[in-house]
Amino acid sequence: MIPTDFEDVAQQVATGRLARQSIQGLLQEAHDRYRENREGLQAHYIPALGHADPEHFALSMAHVGGSVFEVGDCGHEFSLQSISKMFVFALAVQHLGRDEVRERIGVNNTGLPFNSVMAIELNEGRPMNAMVNAGAIATTELVPGEGPEDKWVAIHRGLSDFAGRELQLDAEVYASESAANERNKALGRLLKSYGRILGDPEAAVDVYTRQCSLRITTRDLAVMGATLADGGVNPVTGVRVLDADTCRDTLAAVAASGLYERSGDWMFEIGIPAKSGVSGGIVAVAPGKGALGAFSPRLDSAGNSVRGQLAVGHLSRTLGLNLFASAPERWSVPER
Ligand code: GLN
């Protein structure tokens, strides 16, 4: 653990403004640039995802000022999949507090793929973070509610608040994944054996499968992400979904593990916290500025949308979102 002494020290906030206001034009530029890219393969291990049209490509951005910009197949709905993990983590931190969630789940990267069994074994049963399947399955127990049904209601309501509309379950994806998720059930049982799941592990996996099956658009992703960029208030509806500290903690956990074992490379190249899902979605959050939602089904070998990564990377540069980039304030000195 990192030693800290923050108890009586208020959090000050200093984020920059968006460097350029021509968001619509820059979204279009990114879309044009990558729409011919056909690298990667859509996920097939969940049979319903194999039926997706691999040509779909959509980009959205929600600004913390409340405007939303979109290009491409923005009306197309797809399943939320792993992107749900960061928002359910946020609900758990909001409900139980950061220390308890950190103790039960963790906020460090496993260095291993999203569905790894080894990651549990190597860490004495601790799932390590909520952005991989094991951690996400355990996190479903940490949201408010008595049993799995109540917890599902809280998750459904919470994720809908992030989006600013009532999200619907994709019955086909839910049935398809439920019939093909032996591995997640195995993760659930292993976590139970280590005492990291207290209730019925199959019920925890079922709640997790439902949250993964919610239908969203890139616009929803952008608005959900922008709620985390906006101190916990949905910038479109004006509803407070979370406390600002919970947003900060969620984005820190996402920065460490949102792109699984490629998260370090992601931060090195793109420089903003982002979460991907196997249906081809990516949400990327620029604190104090807004969020990008991307969708395109073809994935790389780690399960991340190829076009989505390229487009978000491009936009991070052109919109000036990279958290680590700076330019000298006072001196005009040539670059080395
Ligand atoms: N529902 C998927 C699974 O459990 C989510 C994985 C993902 O999006 N990476 O495998």
Image (tube, helix red, strand yellow):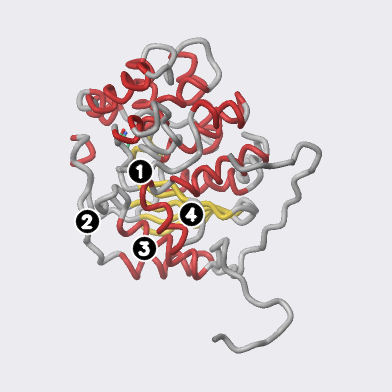
SS category of the residue bearing label 2: loop
| Disc with the residue nearer the chain's start (3 vs 4) | 4
Q: Amino acid at mark 2?
A: Gly
Would you place residue 252 above or below residue 330 in this image? above
In the image, residue 16 lies at what x, y percent?
67, 62
Name the residue nearer the viewer: 147 or 230.
147
> Which quadrant holds the N terminus?
top right
On screen, residue 279 versus residue 149, left or right, reads left
Q: Which residue is mark 2?
A: 40
What's the distance in space between the residues labelled 3 and 2, CA to CA?
12 Å
| Disc with the residue nearer the chain's start (1 vs 4) | 1
Name the residue nearer the viewer: 157 or 147.
147
Q: Amino acid at mark 1?
A: Gly
Quarter of the render that holds ligand 1: top left
What's the distance in space between the residues labelled 3 and 4, CA to CA?
12 Å
Q: Quadrant of residue 137?
A: top left
In the image, residue 308 lies at what x, y percent?
36, 56
Q: Confirm if mark 1 falls within 8 A of ligand 1.
A: yes
Q: Residues within 10 Å of mark 2 (few under 14, many from 20)?
A: some
| Disc with the residue nearer the chain's start (2 vs 1) | 2
On screen, residue 61 versus residue 31, left or right, reads right
SS category of the residue bearing label 3: helix
In the image, residue 335 lies at what x, y percent?
56, 85
Q: Which mark is residue 310?
A: 3
Q: Which residue is mark 4?
A: 292
User: Disc 2, disc 1: CB below 8 Å?
Assistant: no
Q: Amino acid at mark 4?
A: Leu
In the image, residue 227 lies at what x, y percent?
59, 43
